Image (cartoon, rainbow, N blue to C red):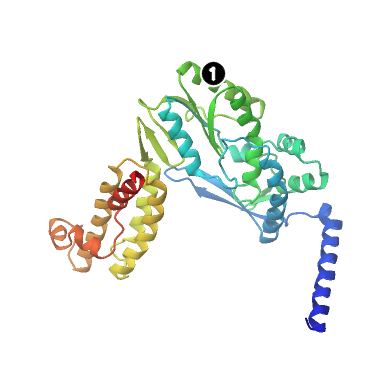
Amino acid sequence: MKRSNVRRAQGRRILDRERTYKWNQNQTQWQPRAIAANLNYLKSPKPGSTETRPLGIPTIRDRVVQAATRHVLEPILERQFAEHSYGFRPNRGCKDALRRVNALLKAGFKYVVDIDLKSYFDTIPHARLILELRKYVADNQLVALVEKFIHAEIKDGLETWTPTSGTPQGAIISPLLSNLYLNDLDHLLAKSGYEMTRYADDLVIQCRTREEAEQALALVAEWTTERGLTLHPTKTKIVHVDEDGFDFLGYRFIKHRRFPRKKSLQKLKDVIRDKTRRNNGSSLNTIIADLNRTLRGWFEYFKHSWRTTFPELDSWIRGRLRSLLRRRAKRKGRGGLRESIEYPNTFFAASGLFGLRDAHVRECQSSKR
């Protein structure tokens, strides 16, 4: 290595040490950005609902600091988390939670306690959350840093306030803290012998009898009251999968079948409607290529749905495309019999349209091998 390169490398190492020293000296004085730049408190509509979900978006600088803090905390807290908690954790995901729910249903756990925590992310008590964190983290400076994150001032229009509860959805560290606060409930249910599956604030408890389900619900109600949380009065309920069914992570479980829940279907159709508007000026091949990206991603998640799901969607999507082609032929109205003859199903298959039914058939065949 040339002498000049050696000197530059040594200089970089000295500079890094100085920056690290300054960070160690000043981390206790660090504050999130001022109100106007710290959190843009947005309200995002919930799919299929008139309700809105508040989102807190930290600045880039604060996101970097939160990411570094999570990098330190996550290995410590991961060792404490329950086995059947799947949300926002390394090497775990929605599909793992769905597999467990499906396996328990097949094993006869058909009474389901469907738990809905009302505005969970917005109602986590700060004082109790910090107490939970101190159980596992002895570094006072690190705990103080987390306190600054959750106490960061919020600006909503012309109004500003300092929150006393909740962790902003949109903040990097929020999922980790939300898992921490429910961790005691996870272990309590497991210790009491209940089959629990949780993904973030989506929680179901599966039981063999209604009596057992009622006892589990009473236990959860008592715990949430003690911890300053609220069960949604109408969405929290006990159901039998063969009679009422239940929703979990985008799926609708009913009897021995799974379907995309109505909100999931509506969200997909809204996206497809936007891509297949009759005034879309792109070529058919471009539109189909754009559709395929959406359809492949959707199918990858919902491919375990009951087989009747896919032909109906295929037919609806082709109908949207026929209406578009009818408009281009300067004919009014939606596509009808004439377009079905002029543009049969084979036409769209030859044009490369991703077929959900065909993909499901291939998936079933490959799983049997």
Q: Quick check: can you spot residue 162?
A: no
Residue at 39% over, 34% down = 253
Vertical position of residue 1 compared to residue 90: above or below:
below
Horizontal and vertical percent position of residue 157: 61, 53
Q: Residue at x 40, y 29 (%)?
A: 106
**Helix, strand or loop status at disc 1:** helix
- Please indicate whether residue 266 sits to the left or right of residue 93 in the image: left
To which quarter of the image does residue 32 belong? bottom right
Disc 1 crowd rating (10 Å Cα; few below 14, some 14-19, many 20+) is few
* Amino acid type at mark 1: Gln
Determine if residue 339 is in view.
yes
Left or right of 366 in this view: 144: right
**Quarter of the image where the N terminus is located:** bottom right
Q: Residue 252, image x and y in percent?
A: 39, 37
Most distant residue in the front direction: 369
Residue topped by disc 1: 215
What's the residue at 61%, 31% (across, down)? 186
Nearest the eye: 360 or 64: 360
Q: Where 188 falls versus 280 (above or below)?
A: above
Q: Position of residue 144 (x, y in %)?
A: 79, 46
Residue 302 percent across, percent down from the top left: 39, 46
Q: Nearer the viewer, residue 234 or 111?
A: 111
- Image quadrant where residue 194 sits: top right
Residue in the foreground of this view, choosing between 288 and 207? 207
